[in-house]
Image: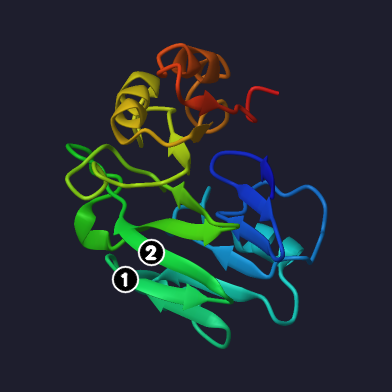
């Protein structure tokens, strides 16, 4: 599979289908999205302007049920936390994505993290969150984790979390743009256990 991280938590994974998570600051109109996952409704994760640049006639949209009024209609799959389902041939699991002690992403809002199995690998996209009782035991092969602080974990908290759940590969997100510094990626990588591979896209 080919992975790209554009800005914030804007992720593109090209496998047998083209999958996006939280498209944001998309520069070119591609109209190639087979599936678009949205974790929550904040502007840097749910951007209609950017969705329009990648959607095509049969794109499937996957969103939290709490967002139905924002993006309801055909080809829209709404999910609740703790669901397991299959979407376009991919196994999909949802986990609540929320903060502790911050007002930005509270558990009652129904925001989602996704675990999608692609090419036999469990890909975990955390959304905007802190380490909490719902995500502390996640099993995954590749994890996209926010590290910018303020709205999410900072790089130290995120490194702590990753060293607990121990994916094979971790990709830091959500820094160097709206929040966080470009240097956070390097600072994060220095705290990660040697047996976990760190891939950084937002430093470039």
Q: Are marks 1 and 2 in contact (CB under 8 Å)?
A: yes
Residue at position x 43%, y 56% from top?
115
* Residue that carries the numbered disc 1 in the rendered image: 83
Determine crowd level at label 1: few under 14, some 14-19, many 20+ residues with C-alpha closer than 10 A. Answer: few
Q: Secondary structure at mark 2?
A: strand
Query: Seen in the image, is 95 located left or right of residue 116?
Result: left
Residue at position x 56%, y 55% from top?
21
Q: Earlier in the sequence, mark 1 or mark 2?
A: 1
CA gap, disc 1 and disc 2: 6 Å
Pick the front one: 204 or 71: 204
160 above or below 39? Answer: above
Residue at position x 31%, y 47% from top?
138
In which quadrant is the C terminus drawn?
top right
Residue 184: image location, x then y, percent: 50, 18
Residue 60: image location, x then y, percent: 60, 76
**Number of residue marks:** 2
Please say whether residue 57 is visible from this viewpoint: yes
Determine crowd level at label 2: few under 14, some 14-19, many 20+ residues with C-alpha closer than 10 A. Answer: many
* Residue that carries the numbered disc 2 in the rendered image: 93
């Amino acid at each position: 599979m080919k992975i790209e991280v554009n800005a914030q938590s804007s992720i593109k994974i090209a496998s047998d289908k083209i999958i996006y998570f939280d498209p944001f600051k998309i520069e070119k109109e591609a109209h190639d999205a087979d599936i678009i996952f949205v974790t929550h409704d904040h502007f840097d994760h749910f951007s209609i302007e950017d969705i329009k640049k990648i959607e095509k006639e049969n794109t499937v949209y996957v969103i939290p049920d709490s967002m139905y009024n924002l993006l309801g209609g055909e080809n829209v799959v709404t999910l609740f936390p703790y669901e397991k389902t299959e979407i376009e041939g991919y196994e999909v699991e949802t986990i609540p994505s929320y903060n502790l002690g911050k007002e930005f992403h509270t558990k009652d809002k129904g925001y989602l993290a996704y675990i999608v199995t692609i090419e036999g690998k469990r890909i975990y996209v955390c959304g905007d969150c802190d380490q909490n009782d719902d995500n502390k035991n996640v099993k995954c092969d590749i994890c996209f984790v926010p590290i910018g602080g303020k709205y999410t974990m900072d790089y130290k908290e995120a490194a702590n979390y990753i060293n607990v759940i121990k994916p094979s590969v971790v990709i830091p997100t959500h820094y160097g743009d709206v929040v966080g510094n470009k240097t956070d990626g390097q600072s994060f990588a220095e705290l990660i256990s040697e047996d976990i591979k760190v891939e950084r896209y937002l430093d470039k």
